[in-house]
Amino acid sequence: MSKDLDKVFKALADPTRRRLLDRLRADNGQTLTDLCTHMDMSRQAVTKHLAILIAADLVVPIRHGREKLHYLNPVPIHDIHQRWISNFEDDRLHALRDLKHALEEKK
């Protein structure tokens, strides 16, 4: 699991790749051409970034006829959340949320 998480962290470290993931989150199942229209870089550069996202299992390409559609796979991000955030921060986050709601009610 450690090597898999390393790939995910490496993929998420780049702002361009995070932007690609945001594009897929907004409109899942896009072709490479669709993704390129929102990026200020060559098709080859987008392809290289997608390859890293695919290797990290953050994006899953599926052939649909002649097209290859790219889908966001949120499972690796959820795994990071489970390991690094939820175990350590859930109680604190819930306490802050409750405090915020209590303060809003007093207004």
Image: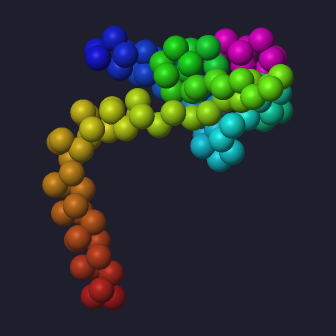
Choose top left, top right, bottom left or bottom right for residue 54: top right
Reply yes or no: does residue 45 show up in magenta: yes
Q: Where is residue 72 shown, x and y percent of the image?
A: 57, 35
Q: Where is residue 28 shown, x and y percent of the image?
A: 65, 41
Can you see residue 62?
Answer: yes
Residue at left 64%, top 17%?
A: 49
Q: From what the image shows, is residue 25 above or below residue 41?
A: below
Question: Would you say 63 lies left or right of 85 here?
Answer: right
Q: Nearer the viewer, residue 69 or 6?
A: 69
Q: Where is residue 101 shown, x and y percent of the image?
A: 29, 76
Q: Nearer the viewer, residue 44 or 29?
A: 29
In the rendered image, the residue lying farthest to the front is 65
Q: Nearer the viewer, residue 29 or 77?
A: 29
Choose top left, top right, bottom left or bottom right for residue 62: top right
Marker count (numbered): 0
> What is the basis of the colouring in this image?
rainbow
Quadrant placement of the C terminus: bottom left
Reply yes or no: does residue 62 show up in magenta: no
Q: Main secondary structure of the magenta part?
A: helix
Q: From what the image shows, is residue 51 above or below residue 98?
A: above
Residue at left 43%, top 22%?
A: 8
Range drawn in magenta = 41-49
Can you see residue 40?
Answer: no
Q: Where is residue 71 shown, x and y percent of the image?
A: 62, 33
Choose top left, top right, bottom left or bottom right for residue 19: top right
Quadrant placement of the N terminus: top left
Question: Would you say 4 lies left or right of 29 here?
Answer: left
Residue at left 47%, top 37%?
A: 74
Q: From what the image shows, is residue 27 above or below residue 46?
A: below
